[in-house]
Image (spheres, rainbow, N blue to C red):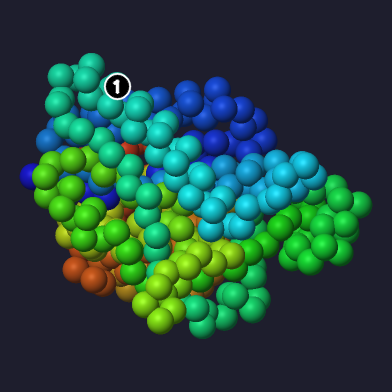
Amino acid sequence: MSRIVIAIGGNAILNPARGSPIEQQKMIEETCREIARIIQRGYDVVLTHGNGPQIGNILAMQEECALVHPQPLDVCGAETQGMLGYSLQQSLDNRLRESGITKQVVTVLTQVVVDASCSSFNNPTKPVGIYYPEPRAHEMMAQGIRMIHDKKGYRRVVASPEPLRIVEEDIIKKLVALGVIVIAGGGGGIPVIRKNGSLSGVEAVIDKDLTGSLLASAVSAETFLILTDVEKAALNYGTDNQVDLDDITVSEAQRYIEEGHFGKGSMEPKILAALRFIKSGGKTSIISSLNKALPALLGTAGTRIIA
Ligand code: ADP
Ligand code: MG
């Protein structure tokens, strides 16, 4: 049976502008319907997901509520794994039952060891969450919160170190071998460092696409499928000369990265993650949209990166 790791985009399951829990639930239901179809086709599926908008909302709630102490970022990441893991686990279980499939679904709270010497700790550049009005942003910066200013306004930035190893890798592999559908590495995993043998959380978020490629290699997947809100990666994205990509080789992908075709922090980490998976022995990486997941696996949608 062909094993695939599916990475579901945080933005694809919650549009930060519209972003109600009802909307998120609806999108999760649609996603799980699609994933159930893939499982019905006989694929052996492992899931991971992003958390950008969700962790942003938790941070915004904390910042606006002076009555309670804010939680550190690793704990906020763990909260999003629980929240999204719960919704995905329940919704996928419902869809599988409807289809008469008896597989069990389980979320593994996942820690990921990061590189403590990663330069991103000294120079955080990963924007998270909502845009803040200028006066509020100045107050926050005065409290020591790092922010950047772009075309749309002020946003908080955090460190996004390289993922090195999934702490719960062995148990994930055992569950997968038992035929359990595992949801793991949500939001890129809870960032931790190991010092003198013990783990502790750090103030950071990890890119979920990069952790997804680690997960895909760890479970010896054949295919790594990254689902987002665009059907294909493109050259000259957003211009009149936009060219959507179908099949590309590793060397073409590398060249397009060097030429700067992919958005930093959005499409670029997907292409990098896709490449890493292939380089560590994977067969195919695919980038596609949620509603085109099955056609992408069957080869009629999405951008495929092949060895
Ligand atoms: P996710 O939550 O799925 O990780 P992201 O917003 O991080 O979503 O990444 C998907 C976004 O990448 C798309 O919505 C698109 O606007 C952007 N993007 C940047 N560069 C490209 C490109 N070259 N081709 C396609 N999409 C791109
Ligand atoms: Mg992203």
- Tell me which corner region of the image, top left, top right, bottom left or bottom right, holds residue 155: bottom right
The residue sitting at 42% across, 31% down in the picture is 87
User: Which residue is the extreme one toward the right?
Assistant: 135
The residue sitting at 25% across, 66% down in the picture is 278
Cβ of mark 1 under 8 A from ligand 1: no
Q: Nearer the viewer, residue 41 or 53?
A: 53
In the rendering, at what x and y percent does residue 254 appear? 39, 72
Local SS, label 1: helix
Q: Is residue 287 left or right of residue 72?
A: left
The residue sitting at 44% across, 41% down in the picture is 82
Type of the residue with mark 1: Asn
Position of residue 129 relative to residue 210, above or below, is: above
> Crowding at label 1, few (<14), some or many (≥20) Cα neighbours within 10 Å?
some
Asked if residue 215 shows in the view, the reply is yes
In the rendering, at what x and y percent does residue 249 appear? 29, 66
Q: What residue is shown with label 1?
A: 94
**Number of marks in picture:** 1
In the rendering, at what x and y percent does residue 42 appear? 12, 36
In the rendering, at what x and y percent does residue 90 appear? 35, 27
Q: Nearer the viewer, residue 98 or 70?
A: 70
The residue sitting at 86% across, 64% down in the picture is 142
Asked if residue 262 shows in the view, the reply is no
